[in-house]
Amino acid sequence: MISLQDQVAVVTGGSRGIGRATVKLLAESGCRVVFSYHTDLPAAQSLEREIAESGGEAIAVGADLRRRAEAEAVIEEAEGRFGRVDVLVANAGIWRVDPVPLEEMTDEEWDETLDLNLKGVFYVVRAALPRMKERRQGRVILVSSTAGQRGEAFHAHYAASKSALIGLTKSLAVEAAATGVLVNCVAPGWVDTDMSAPVLSGPTGDAVFATIPLGRAGRPEEIAGPILFLASPLATFITGEVLNVNGGSVLCG
C-alpha cells in the first residue's frame, strides 16, 4: 500500500463517485482529507463516518465551487485545520445526460458546465498553489476526461471544459516546476457512477461497452488508484502528464 502518512489532501466533489473513492483511498493511505460537496449532505456525512470508523480523518465542506469565496473556503478549511495542503485533487464536475447540438445549446447550459468544470478548478487551484509554491512542495491533480481528448458530440460544453483542464495541467506544470510542485491530470473514460448510470444501465450500455477494449466501464476505485499514484513518492519525476484510465478506449498521449 502506498503511504501518504500525515499528509493533507483536498478533494473537490468528494461525496460521490470518483471523488468518494479518492477520499477513501487517500484516507487509507494515511492522509487527513478535506473534501467538498455541493448538495448531498447525507452522502458527505456518511463518508465522514465511514472514514472515522476505519481510523482515518475526513472533513466535509459544503461549497458551490462556481463561487470564488466558497471554493477558496475549502482550501482555507484545510489550511486552518491542518496547517497546509499537500495534495489537491480537483475532481468536481458535471455532465448532463441529455444530448444538445451546439446550435441549440443555451447560454445557461454552457455557463453551468464551464463555470463548475473549469472556473471552479481555477478557483481552488489558484487558492492552493501559492502556498504549495511557498513550501516548495505539493501535488495538483486535475480530473479531465476522454471527452477532453477526442471530443464528445452533443456534449461540446463538457468536452471543451475537460480539454481546457489538459491545457491547464500542462501550463501549470511548467509554471510550478521550479518550486517543486507537480501538476498532472487523469483522464477517465466511462466510469460506473451515478452521473453515467442513465447511459450505462440503459439500452445504450452495450453500445458504449463495445467501444471499450476491456468491454466494461471502470469502477470509481480504478480511477482513485492512479490518482493516489500521482500523489505518491512513486511519481516524483512526473509532471505535466495526462494519465489515461479508460480501458483502452482512447489510445493517445
Image: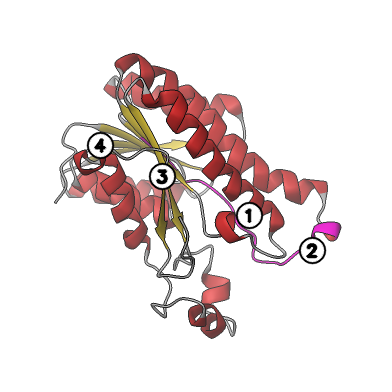
**Residue corresponding to mark 4:** 236
The amino acid marked with disc number 3 is: Glu
Front residue (pair 251, 217) = 251
Mark 1 residue crowding within 10 angstroms, few (<14) / some (14–19) / many (20+) = many
Q: Name the secondary structure under disc 1.
A: helix
Q: Distance between the Cα atoms at labels 2 and 4?
A: 42 Å
Mark 2 surroundings within 10 Å by alpha-carbon count, few (fewer than 14), some (14 through 19), many (20 or more): few
User: From mark 4 to mark 1, how far is it between C-alphas?
Assistant: 29 Å
> Marks 2 and 1, Cα distance to the nearest angstrom?
13 Å
Q: Is residue 173 magenta?
A: no
Report the residue marked by disc 1: 159
Q: Are the residues at dot 2 and dot 4 in contact (C-beta closer than 8 Å)?
A: no
Which numbered disc, 2 or 4, marks the residue that appears first in the sequence?
2
Q: Nearer the viewer, residue 4 or 156?
A: 156
Secondary structure under badge 3?
loop
Identify residue for label 3: 241
